Image: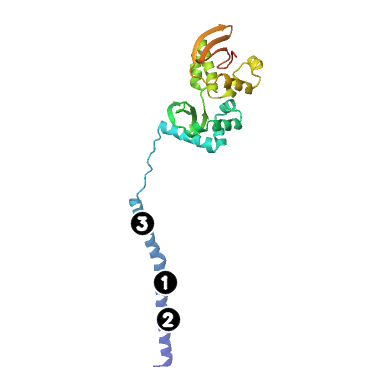
Amino acid sequence: MDLSKLKKWILLIAIFICIITIILIMVILNKGNNEPNSIFRQDTKKEHIDTIQYLEFNEIPSTYISDVQMCNIYLLDYKNNALYHTQEAYNSLNEEYREKRFGNFNTYEKYVQEHIDDILQIKLDKYQIIKYDNYIQYICIDQFGNYYIFNETAIMRYTVLLDTYTIDLPQYIEAYNKSNNTQKVAMCINRFINAIKDKNYIYAYSLLSSGFKQNYFSTQEQFESYIKQNITKIEQVMFNTVKTEGNLYMYTVTLSPQITKTFIVNLKQGTDFELSFNV
C-alpha cells in the first residue's frame, strides 16, 4: 500500500476515535450533571413526604393550676424572698402599704428577723380569691392567723400586703360605707387594736390625734414603750358602751379581763380617723 494512503487512513481513524471520545465524554458529563440531580430532588421530595407522613409529635399537656395551688406558689415565693432575698421581698410589697407599714427597708428587715420563726413555718390554712377588673386578689391566711394578700396582675407578677388594715382594701371600703357611725367607730378601733397585736407601732402611732401625742407620746418610741408595758396581751376584744360628744365617739372596749380602755374617736373624710385613749 502506498505510504501516503496509509498515513491518510491512520489520520482518519485517529479523527474518528477523537470524535467518539468527545461524544462519550459529553454524554457522561451530561449524565453526571443532570440525572443525579434529578434523582436527588425526587428522593428528597419522597423523603420529605415520608417524614411528614410518619413523624410523631409529643403533645404538650394542658396544665391546670388550682386556686389553692396558686396560693401556695405565691406563699412559697414570698417566703423564699423574705428569707434569702429580703430586698426583693421588700420591693414586692404594695408601695403605699410599704411606706405606711415600714417606712424603709431597715424596718422591714427588722420585722423579718422578729418573725423569722413564723416565716419559716408558713403553711396555708385558709384562702379567698377575689377577681377584679385589672387584677386577682389572693387572700391567704397561715396557721398562725397571719395575712398574706397577693394582688396579681399577671402570672408571678404581684404586690403583697401583710395585713388587712394598714391600707384600705376594696372590701373594707365597701363595708365601711354601708355602716352607721357607731359601726364605723368600732371598725376604726379594730384597726388600731390589730396594729398593736401585730406590733405595727409605726401605723398605730400614726392613728393617734396630734394633741394626744403632744400630751403623752411625743415620740413613737415612748408610745411603743407604753404599749409593751401596759397592754401586754390582747386576749379578746369586746365593745361595750358608746357615748357621743359633738363629733367625738367614746367607746369602752375590753381587751382582756384586766385591761379596759375608753377610746375617743374622731371620724374624718372617707375612712380616715384619729383616736386617743385613757392612759
Q: x%, y% of residue 14?
A: 42, 83
Q: Residue at x 58, y 33 (%)?
A: 109
> In this figure, which residue is indicated by the disc labeled 3?
47
State which mark lies toward you, 2 or 3.
3
Residue 116 in the image, given as x and y percentages of width and height: 52, 33
Q: Foreground residue, 269 or 244?
A: 244
Give the answer, above or below, for where 12 lies relative to 47: below
Give the amino acid type for the residue marked by disc 2 in the picture.
Ile
The residue beneath circle 1 is 26
Q: From this viewpoint, is residue 109 visible?
A: yes
The scheme the figure's colours follow is rainbow
C-alpha gap between disc 2 and disc 1: 17 Å
Which residue in the protein does label 2 denote?
Answer: 15
Q: What distance separates the C-alpha of mark 3 from that of mark 1?
A: 31 Å
Q: Amino acid at mark 3?
A: Glu
Q: Nearer the viewer, residue 274 or 226?
A: 226
Q: Which residue appears at 36% of the width and 56% of the height? A: 47
Nearest the eye: 186 or 258:
258
Q: Quadrant of the N terminus?
A: bottom left
**Number of numbered tags placed on the structure image:** 3
Depth check: give the residue in front, 222 or 60.
Answer: 222
| SS at circle 3 | helix
